[in-house]
Image (cartoon, rainbow, N blue to C red):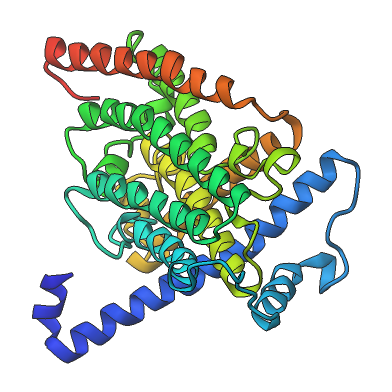
């Protein structure tokens, strides 16, 4: 980004960069609106209902109607709440959820900040995300939100550990923490994707196990069913969101869904080849098209894979019953943590012994 600003001058460079960030944000929010509709439609289909079908053709504008409703309603702040922290919590959650997307490449070169330590940046931002939830639960000055926020913090911290070890296995294979480099490492067709490394009898079973663990940990990390303990309506009404309404609630909800889609994008980049299609086209064929058209094709593949993972998230929400809290913690600390640590040792041993990275 700094090279771009130096090349095009300070004013024009900064204006272009800000324009790119705004465009990315708008596209992300629009995608989120339709993904939210898809989430509700999948849930409805499992229950043999129609789902939202009134606002706009086939209910396509339902999310925008909900958005408008949240914006126009009155913001109610409980009398005993700490007003400043109460309003700061959802803003912090949303800002950090957007900030995490800065290092996600959606096509070659199409990334806001192409950091060499992109993975570390993601760890840092996702760890800070817990603070927004704790602040919201504490500032509400009510029992249910406080319990919900404590559960959420414990859950997110617990599963971040195993997610960290799982990502380390991919870093060991690629030899880089840059997400663009990780995607480029899987460019030779679906048999070079980390999940489908069929040609390697040692790596293939390890990567399959690691991928399944990452998927389940992502559900727990984003407080999605069957791990939605922080907002278990049978026990805690709506968890840390109990006292929130109108726009602050909307900010929490957008932040939550941004984190869910981020996890889907991470699975795409780490295990499913990022923006690469399953069968590569030769350089001679690709060179017939302009770069922007090729990149649009890459973007389409990236979006298709991300939407597929979001569909799986929605399906799990509809068909899997909620875990008990002790079961959730047992799964994280007694099963996922040792297994992911074992996977790190196996992959590290493979890389050191063979002297090659996948």
Query: Split into 4 quadrants, where in the image is the N terminus?
Result: bottom left
Query: Split into 4 quadrants, where in the image is the C terminus?
Result: top left
Camera sees residue 199: no
Foreground residue among 25 and 155 = 155
Foreground residue among 289 and 177 = 177
Foreground residue among 41 and 336 = 336
Q: Which image quadrant for residue 227? A: top right
> Vertical placement of 159 versus 137: above or below?
above
Residue 230 place in picture, x, y as percent: 58, 42
Residue at the bottom extreme of this rendering? 11
Residue 59 place in picture, x, y as percent: 81, 66
Residue sitting at x 42%, y 12%: 205
Decide if residue 228 is on the left or right side of residue 137.
right
> Vertical placement of 89 versus 178: above or below?
below
Decide if residue 158 is on the left or right side of residue 307.
left
Q: Which image quadrant for residue 282? A: top left
Residue sitting at x 45%, y 51%: 134
Total numbered labels? 0
Residue sitting at x 46%, y 44%: 263
Residue 86 place in picture, x, y as percent: 49, 67
Foreground residue among 16 and 77 = 77
Residue sitting at x 17%, y 91%: 11
Decide if residue 235 is on the left or right side of residue 188.
right
Residue 147 place in picture, x, y as percent: 56, 43
Camera sees residue 47: yes
Decide if residue 311 is on the left or right side of residue 85.
right
């Amino acid at each position: 980004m700094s090279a771009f600003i130096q090349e095009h001058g300070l004013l024009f460079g900064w204006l272009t960069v800000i324009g790119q960030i705004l465009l990315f944000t708008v596209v992300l929010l629009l995608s989120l609106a339709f993904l939210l509709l898809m989430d509700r439609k999948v849930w409805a289909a499992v229950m043999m209902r129609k789902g939202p079908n009134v606002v706009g053709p086939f209910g396509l504008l339902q999310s925008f109607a909900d958005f408008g409703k949240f914006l126009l309603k009155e913001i109610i702040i409980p009398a005993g709440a700490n007003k400043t922290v109460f309003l700061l919590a959802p803003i912090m959650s949303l800002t950090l959820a957007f900030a995490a997307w800065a290092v996600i490449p959606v096509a070659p070169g199409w990334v806001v900040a192409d950091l060499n330590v992109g993975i570390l940046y993601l760890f840092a931002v996702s760890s800070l995300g817990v603070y927004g939830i704790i602040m919201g639960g504490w500032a509400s000055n009510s029992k249910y939100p406080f319990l919900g926020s404590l559960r959420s913090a414990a859950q997110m911290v617990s599963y971040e550990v195993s997610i960290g070890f799982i990502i380390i296995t991919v870093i060991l294979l690629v030899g880089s923490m840059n997400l663009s480099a990780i995607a480029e490492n899987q460019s030779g067709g679906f048999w070079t994707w980390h999940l489908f490394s069929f040609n390697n009898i040692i790596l293939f079973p390890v990567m399959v196990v690691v991928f399944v663990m990452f998927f389940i940990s992502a559900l727990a990390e984003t407080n999605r069913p069957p791990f939605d303990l922080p907002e278990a309506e049978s026990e805690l009404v709506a968890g840390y969101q109990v006292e929130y309404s109108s726009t602050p609630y909307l900010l929490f909800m957008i932040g939550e869904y941004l984190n869910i889609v981020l996890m889907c994008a991470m699975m795409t980049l780490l295990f499913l080849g990022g923006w690469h299609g399953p069968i590569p086209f030769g350089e001679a064929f690709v060179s017939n098209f302009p770069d922007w058209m090729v990149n649009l094709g890459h973007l389409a593949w990236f979006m298709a894979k991300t939407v597929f993972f979001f569909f799986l998230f929605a399906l799990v929400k509809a068909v899997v019953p909620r875990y008990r809290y002790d079961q959730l913690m047992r799964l994280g600390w007694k099963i996922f943590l040792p297994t992911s640590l074992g996977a790190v040792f196996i992959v590290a041993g493979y890389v050191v012994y063979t002297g090659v990275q996948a």
